[in-house]
Image: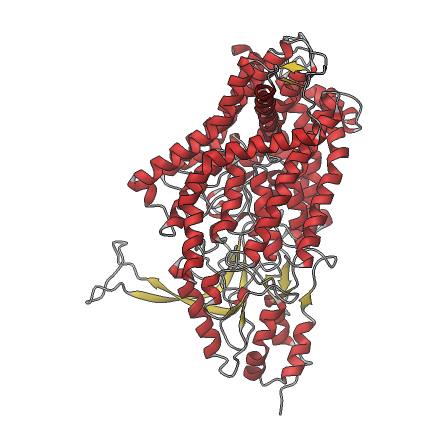
Amino acid sequence: MTANSVLQITVYVLVLLACAKPLGGYMARIYEDRPAGLNRWLAPVERLIYRLCSVNPAVEMRWTDYTVALLLFNLLGLLALFALQRLQGVLPLNPQHLPGISPDSAFNTAVSFATNTNWQGYGGEITMSYLTQMLGLTVQNFVSAATGMAALVALTRGFARRNADTIGNFWVDLTRGTLYILLPLATALALVLVSQGVVQTFSPYRTVALTQPVTYEQAKLGDDGQTLEDAAGNPVTETVAVREQTLAVGPAASQIAIKQLGTNGGGFFNVNSAHPFENPTPLSNFLEMLAILLIPAALCHTFGVLIGDTRQGWAILAAMTVVFVTLIVVIVPLEQAGNPALSALGVDQQPQASQPGGNMEGKETRFGITNSALWALATTAASNGSVNAMHDSFTPLGGMIPMWLMQLGEVIYGGVGSGLYGMIVFAIVAVFVAGLMIGRTPEYLGKKIEAYEVKMASLVILIPPFVVLVGTAVAVMVDVGKASVANAGAHGFSEILYAFSSAGNNNGSAFAGLSANTPFYNTALGLAMLFARYWLAVPTLAIAGALAAKKVVPFGPGSLPTHTPLFVVLLIGTVLIVGALAFLPVLALGPVVEHLQLFGAH
Amino acid sequence: MYQHLKPAILMLLVWTLLTGTVYPTAVTSLAYLLFPEQSEGSLLLGPDGAPSGSRLIGQPFSDPKYFWGRPSATAPYPYNAAASSGSNLGPRNPALVQAVSARIAALRATDTGNSASIPVDLVTASGSGLDPHISPAAAAYQVPRVAKQRGLPVAALQEFVERYVESRQFGILGEARVNVVELNLALDRSTSLKPVR
């Protein structure tokens, strides 16, 4: 790694950790309804929302009611987004006259955004009208994130309460998370991004003259729309001159701000945050990258405050950060080393002050290697899925690390809310394993962990690997699965494995060479996203309900302290061992084979 | 179950209104007031006042008298700013090696005396296909060719290019880079650069 790489990474990690305490404390005050500034100034708005929606904020819900409300709200959002996409052709705010979207793609995208996955089977600027981007995608960016945070807060109440039969009111948690946390942060970030050059306009696409016109060859079509062929059977081509450039613009900044903050990741443009209008400068890149992990990291402190023991939150944040930093130190040199196939051609890939060097295929000059690799890790550590470089063109092992981070279950920071509740479930398994080793009844945060909780926790941990591995196996067995692959051999297998790892853990990033906008992938990945979101949220809320009903066990000599470095190691070990056992064999077939082939040949 | 249906429908409507309409409209209005140029795409205006491109979006250059930008994988022609795209070629894909070899051959063919090794960003496709920048090394590599084509002294052009090098933001973030669109426009309009007689 170069000195500047170390510096940029250090600044990033330090700023992230420095934000965790103030933001985490603020979010705790919001969810506990203690004074926090905004929730007093905007209190009339909050009350008005409850009145309009006939919600009584004082009424608490049992875990079953909380779950039904959450699922119902998500289902309605999914249906609304599906309808909006199908009908966008006849709806307003569609200056490019984009047609309605096919049923399978609309299903995939509706699931994708409702589940906070934001897998993009489509290219934004050639598919979605401004209306769909705003009323559909942006809305789900907010509420799917607020849903994840609500489920986390509900789980937290399970630990904090004793002998209780309720875990909060879903509508209140949803409203407070959106109104006081996501909306203000997104508005501020959006404006800073515009200052850097991110577009935000309702104007149609712009046409400008090119400095140097270009020509290209295009297959000539006959009157029947078929490619014409000459006597020898070769396709006839014609030369087309291009003198103008059409610049795709739109209300991008408002959507980009929330897609980063809400660990959504679905971009305004096809290439997401690699697009200069979506991420124009190193500063915009830094802020967008910070926004990915900001709320997930800060929620650790929120958790600590809400359960009345901040050390517990810091221990979890420490476990996440140790894994994250370790993997950064691995991935940056892998990408900086470059591609041996290009060294053989005499290309200069040496990183230095005057050039980023390294594996630059699919990466932007302004970000270079360091920021592309760092972003790849942040976006897969959190279940964000936005990209600022094409992961498909990473070196074999450089692409394996983001893939493995997703396969760990999106708990290294993870999605807003969902990452931390996933990590808490891993903590439950960790204390259970520790309890087995020392022969004591396991406890976590003063609650006895019994068979029911461990069963639910096992579901949460085992469903994603099951979805990923079975999905991948099916896709490589059927022709429609294999036909979408862009790169042959081991890399093609990695493309499929990456897609299911992404959908099966609600991430949304892609090895984008895979042509996933087909009925097979739209359906298979759509189902994977549904399972991965709700089959995890429901058992988590069940744990919340079961814990809330328990009494508190006083901390005794047989209790395992869960804020110590020892527990941090135990927690990391649990996450890594589950992730390694489930996925090392399949990773060996994809990225590892490709690495050996690439470096063996050069 | 039905008791939650009514609030679910109403909540969805309220949040669609607030986050789908009020929020983007408010951000658009504020952006227009505070940053009118950036919000509309950072357009570069030509001498006649008509836009001659965006400062942020690259353009295709293949004429030897211009500095060339990053190769672009957009379809059906490079730097199609209405459909951004990377190549998504894997590191072992034979198509990647072929494409890079062809780009090296094109650079060598227009610059026969130059045997310096070629900076990697000049022969690999960018992620967006719209990258307006190249590294300072990639610009320096092309100075002899552009100088020869335009009949300019190498040292003077070198100095001209250095004025267009943007350093890392705050000295730390990102990478040093040269905006190819701005550099080429400036080159065409420059009156300070005098051809060698």
Residue A139 seen in render: no
In this rendering, position of residue B176 left or right of residue B68: right
* A2 sits left or right of B105 in the view: right
The percent position of residue A251, horizontal first and vertical second, equals: 60, 44
Q: Which residue lies furthest to the front in this view?
A: A438
Q: Nearer the viewer, residue A196 or B20?
A: A196
Residue in the image at 50% along x and 80% along y: B111
Q: The C terminus of chain B lies in which quarter of the figure?
A: bottom right
**Is A110 drawn above or below residue A361 in the view shown?**
above
Q: Position of residue A407 (x, y in %)?
A: 50, 36
Q: Is residue A447 in view?
A: yes
Of A353 and A137, nearer the camera is A353
On the image, the x and y values in percent for residue A456 come to 52, 18
Question: In this orientation, which residue lies closer to the viewer: A305 or A579?
Answer: A579
- Which residue does the image show at 63% across and 24% down from the upper left? A152
According to the image, what is the colour scheme of the structure? secondary structure
Q: In this view of the protein, which residue sits in the foreground, A602 or B127? A: A602
Across the whole image, how many numbered discs are drawn on residues? 0
**Which picture quadrant has residue A363?**
bottom right
Residue that lies at the very extreme toward the bottom in this rendered image: B197
Q: In this view, does B185 lie above or below A89?
A: below
State the image coordinates of residue A455 (x, y, percent, origin top left).
51, 17
